[in-house]
């Protein structure tokens, strides 16, 4: 301020669109190869450092990947950039290990099959060089510890007359200079040393001494996944979300009607903090679709509903958070209601921005960005596949309208991304003035389906909400005139926490891109 006049700052220039490049693919299908149902990826999650990536599939398996391109220098990519260290290689990951997290079960009381499909994976804080993560299927959450262990081998009994040495082990006799091989299970590959078969008979006069098997710790290491805790029998309905608290001690799990709060150390008790189940189930009008803790405030969490609203609750207000601290919903435009209005308004996923200021939500047709300090409406809205609006009746008939697409934000909060059909995903710039709206395909040539018509922001709906709509120009065919395939869908994707790198799942294949 100077003399009562406001100092006007120049508006920040919008960030230029990113140029995305293919990085890696795991589990790539050959042309015509049939995809097994159990191999389809159902969850993707980076850890907080971005050095590890986890995927879950419909077969109940969790596969871990670790980053390799920063290990050579011993520092993070960001630190190397600060030191002006030349970085020529793109982010690279390698297969680390996998384990069977869940098995198919049967609920005999309700006569229901519980499938093994992994719904969500969340990384927990690392400790003593071990990795910890939570995984859940429809009913049961498990807490896993993944750690390198030194392999222990058992040396086999040696009935060759030996000379005794200390600690029960025996040295081979002088007339035998051939080393006897040991196997991990204590057996011997050479049949002549296998004295434990039924045909063995002691020589006349017996044996002068007997060497007992000895456990030997080798220098070889192996990654071992061990289930530390099982959090079960707390949900009557299918679990759709799990989320870690910033306090590092607790997490939430959400199903259609309830949200429970757990302590990581206590598996036989949870606290019900949200319950939207009505006394009469005929009065049920909406269900919980997604829930997530605030990234830094351990007392705050948000959950979305099938009616397109997001509720922010404060755990300090009461033990049972029936009332919300804030409600975010977009008022329905007059005259726009149709049979599909409520179905496509249902929010399938919400994510907090890294700083906790914004919430990104995905419904069937759009991405919406909400400012938690402004509950009058979203600050930005991005149309993902507006060309589908005339086809909603067909999508309802084949149940595609109920597909649950995930969304993600970049670590710097400048961009958002979500998936669509034909294995396409879209990246939008959400900084002020940005017109970035990129369409990419989950393939080795991500820009192959790039739409030629530039995406332009349309007029804001109102000066109060400052909503920006983008991406509506995409037609029902791609730039090559190929029709979109509604049977292939990109539901799951994740943005690296510190870099412009995206991992996304197309059926059983994991594709990675960088910019």
Image: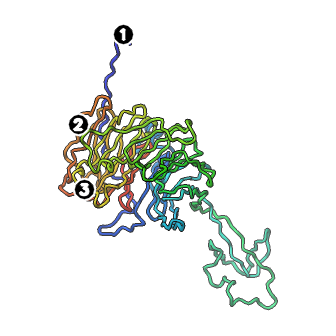
Question: Which percent across, then down, holds residue 496?
Answer: 43, 46
Q: Is residue 10 above or below residue 435?
A: above
Q: Which residue is mark 2?
A: 458
Which numbered disc flags the more N-terminal residue, 1 or 2?
1
Question: Which percent across, then down, holds residue 366?
Answer: 31, 45
For the point 66% across and 77% down, which residue is it?
A: 180
- Return the mark for residue 35: none
Question: Which percent across, then down, holds residue 139?
Answer: 51, 59
Nearer to me, 213 or 122: 122
Nearer to me, 222 or 203: 222
Q: Is residue 376 above or below residue 274?
A: above
Q: For the residues marked 3 and 1, what is the alpha-carbon distance in whole angstroms?
A: 59 Å
Viewer-nearest of labels 1 and 2?
2
Q: Which residue is mark 1?
A: 4
Question: Which percent across, then down, holds residue 110?
Answer: 51, 65
Helix, strand or loop for disc 1 = loop
Viewer-nearest of labels 3 and 2?
3
- Return the mark for residue 393: 3
User: Is 351 on the left-hand or right-hand side of 481?
Assistant: right
Helix, strand or loop for disc 3 = helix
Nearer to me, 10 or 266: 266
User: Is 255 on the left-hand or right-hand side of 399?
Assistant: right
Q: For the residues marked 1 and 2, what is the alpha-carbon distance in whole angstroms?
A: 36 Å
Q: Is residue 307 above or below residue 104?
A: above
User: Is 488 on the left-hand or right-hand side of 137?
Assistant: left
Q: Residues within 10 Å of mark 3 (few under 14, many from 20)?
A: some
Q: Are marks 3 and 1 in contact (CB under 8 Å)?
A: no
């Amino acid at each position: 301020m100077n003399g009562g006049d406001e100092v006007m700052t120049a508006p920040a220039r919008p960030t230029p669109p990113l140029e995305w490049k293919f990085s890696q693919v795991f589990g790539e299908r050959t042309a015509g190869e049939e995809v097994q149902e159990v191999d389809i990826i159902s969850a993707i999650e980076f850890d907080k450092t971005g050095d590890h990536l986890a995927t879950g599939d419909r077969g109940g398996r969790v596969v871990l990947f670790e980053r390799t391109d920063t290990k050579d220098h011993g520092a993070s990519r960001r630190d190397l950039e600060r030191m002006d260290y030349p970085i020529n290689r793109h982010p690279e990951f390698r297969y680390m290990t996998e384990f069977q997290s869940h098995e198919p079960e049967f609920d005999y009381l309700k006569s229901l099959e519980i499938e093994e499909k992994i719904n969500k994976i969340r990384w927990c804080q690392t400790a003593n060089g071990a990795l910890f993560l939570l995984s859940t299927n429809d009913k049961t959450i498990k807490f896993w510890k993944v750690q390198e262990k030194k392999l222990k081998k058992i040396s086999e009994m040696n009935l060759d007359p030996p000379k005794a040495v200390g600690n029960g082990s025996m040295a081979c006799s002088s007339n035998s200079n051939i080393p006897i091989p040991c196997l991990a299970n204590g057996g011997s590959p050479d049949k002549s040393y296998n004295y434990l078969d039924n045909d063995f008979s002691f020589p006349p006069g017996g044996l002068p001494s007997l060497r007992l098997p000895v456990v030997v710790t080798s220098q070889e290491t192996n990654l071992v996944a061990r289930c530390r805790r099982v959090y079960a029998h707390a949900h009557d309905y299918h679990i759709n979300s799990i989320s870690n608290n910033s306090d590092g001690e607790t997490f939430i799990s959400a199903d259609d009607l309830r949200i429970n709060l757990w302590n990581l150390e206590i598996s036989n008790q949870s606290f019900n903090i949200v319950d939207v189940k009505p006394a009469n189930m005929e009065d049920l009008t909406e269900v919980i679709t997604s829930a997530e803790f605030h990234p830094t405030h351990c007392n705050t969490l948000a959950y979305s509903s099938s009616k397109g609203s997001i509720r922010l609750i404060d755990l300090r207000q009461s033990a049972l958070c029936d009332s919300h601290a804030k409600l975010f919903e977009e008022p329905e435009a007059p005259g726009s209601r149709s049979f599909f209005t409520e179905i496509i308004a249902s929010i399938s996923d919400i994510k907090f921005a890294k700083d906790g200021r914004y919430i990104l939500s995905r419904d069937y047709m759009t991405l919406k960005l909400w400012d938690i300090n402004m509950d009058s409406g979203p600050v930005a809205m991005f149309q993902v596949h507006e060309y589908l609006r005339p086809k909603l009746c067909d999508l309802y008939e084949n149940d595609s309208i109920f597909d649950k697409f995930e969304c993600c934000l970049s670590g710097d909060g400048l961009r958002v991304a979500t998936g669509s059909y034909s294995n396409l995903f879209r990246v939008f710039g959400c900084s002020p003035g940005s017109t970035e709206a990129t369409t990419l395909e989950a393939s080795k040539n991500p820009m192959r389906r790039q739409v030629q018509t530039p995406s332009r922001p349309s007029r804001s709906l109102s000066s109060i909400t400052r909503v920006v709509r983008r991406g509506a120009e995409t037609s029902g065919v791609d730039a090559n005139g190929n029709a979109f395939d509604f049977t292939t869908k990109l539901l799951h994707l994740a943005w690296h926490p510190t870099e412009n790198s995206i991992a996304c799942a197309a059926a059983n294949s994991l594709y990675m891109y960088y910019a």
